[in-house]
Amino acid sequence: MIWHSSDLQDVLSNLDVNPQKGLSAGSADERLEEFGPNLLTTHKKKSFWIRFLAQFQNYMVIILLLAALVSFIVTIFSSESNWFEPILILVIVLANALLGAFQESKAENALEALKSMTAPSAKVLRDGIVRLIDASQLVPGDILLLEAGDYISADARLIEAVSCCCDESTLTGESVPVEKIAEDGLEEIVSLSERHNMVYSGCSVTHGRATAVVTETGMNSEMGKISALLEQTKEQDTPLKTKLENLGKMLGVVTLAICAIVFVVTVTRNFASPGAPFATMLLDTFMNSISLAVAAIPEGLPAIVTVVLALGVQRMVKQNAIIKNLPAVETLGSASVICSDKTGTLTLNQMTVTKLFDGKQELDLSKDSITEPGRMLLRLGAICSDAKVERNGSRKSNIGDPTEIGIAAACSKYAGISKQDIETSCPRFGEIPFDSDRKLMTTINMIDGRPFAVVKGAPEILLERCIGCDEKAVLAANQAMAEDALRVLAVAIKPLEEIP
């Protein structure tokens, strides 16, 4: 069944669920047995020793091991006991392998830690009772209850949506929250970002609330399909690894060729003018050729490369970047241009207030001192928003629309008042939520003991309803900010005689 284009009643009938009561406990257990847990399957984790042995699958390393072996043989059969060189070669090879395996295991553990941090729960309706269950226990047919700040753990068709917006940046790359509507009549072929009657695993609710019926879980979800595609991709060697392997091949061939030539020429000369016994001469010549081969191999090259790459990895760790394979550092460092239209996703995925127009002048918050009207503007913007900042010990989490979160953060930073303090000092008594038709949001707040209507929204819409402002200056500021690719919002305030 195509979930987004089918009628809601057909979807509920296909999933055999009553939206008022949800699934029974027995039915949920049966479906969990049939569909499996709501988890993304991943490839089996490699052990440390498998990673360690994999480091030896390199021509340069193989040549060094052969050089060490030959050096041991030369030392055993020669009159001089020079064990330093073969032991040094082995130490370098083992140190390289240990460092590479340790870095890969460390990166793998860091990624696993990130996964464990996002082990969400889900609020569902079962047997007519709202229950909080582990997200891995969700099954098709479960009735999901969603509200602002909730993490969506499975693909679901909306039954009801009230001012609901979802952040789908992890799935589509679009950082702007998507408005969700419980509607029928969508076409079968519709891009995922335009399926407004669906919510998807891996996304989150930024605003409003919704009720939805789970349609797909685990690897059958859209996120699961992406995970399956990633599992099918084959790892490609980095340019640095390819170059080192080519260098190893070339050194091996050239070294063996030179050694063979030296051996043949020396044997021919000694054979033409015999002195020592032929067998002794042959062994000495062979040992000299082998010594030449050992000397020609750059034992320090892998060590130098590994140390330099490890230093690069440590510098990137300080910037919160996790590198799984050491040679990838060189590849990333060689990139000079990255082209993408997913700015919010590739950067911090965080909206930030950068400029203000306080009615008289434009302020660049990165370098200009904020004015008193500018502080008032930020406070009013934070008043007329639903963003929440919650603290759990030392951890802080932001819930809500990214734009409103940015306004609340700027208010705290530049105006010196937090969102919690604003909610306490300026309590809200009513609101008209933002919608795509009106393009405005209105709240009724008590400010300094008097009711005010605070409105936030599209400048061209709000300006039509305003008096007592310089319309030309506002439009000019709006145009200038828009040309700088900024998202522009206007804020207005109106005193009221009483709370409507």
Image (tube, rainbow, N blue to C red):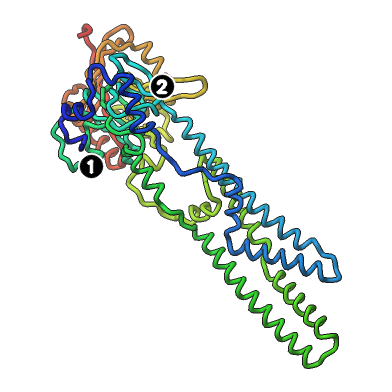
Quarter of the image for residue 404 reads top left
Relative height, residue 62 to residue 410 (above, below): below
At a point 42% along the width and 29% down the height, the residue shown is: 369
Q: Quadrant of the C terminus?
A: top left
Depth order, front residue of 331/452 = 331
Is 476 displayed left or right of 244 in the figure? left
Q: Position of residue 267 (x, y in %)?
A: 75, 86
Quarter of the image for residue 366 reads top left
Is 58 displayed left or right of 87 in the figure? left
Residue at disc 2, secondary structure: strand
Residue that numbered label 2 is attached to: 389
Mark 2 → mark 1, Cα distance in angstroms: 33 Å
Quarter of the image for residue 119 reads top left
Q: Position of residue 127 (x, y in %)?
A: 29, 15
Residue 396 shows in the view = yes
Relative height, residue 49 to residue 159 (above, below): below
Q: Which mark is residue 447?
A: none
Q: Position of residue 53 (x, y in %)?
A: 60, 53
Residue that numbered label 1 is attached to: 191
Depth order, front residue of 234/474 = 234
Q: Position of residue 335 (x, y in %)?
A: 45, 55
Q: Quadrant of the N terminus?
A: top left
Depth order, front residue of 266/13 = 13
Q: Amino acid at mark 1?
A: Ser
Q: Earlier in the sequence, mark 2 or mark 1?
A: 1
At a point 35% along the width and 24% down the height, the residue shown is: 29
Residue at disc 1, secondary structure: loop
Relative height, residue 288 to residue 183 (above, below): below
Q: Amino acid at mark 2?
A: Val
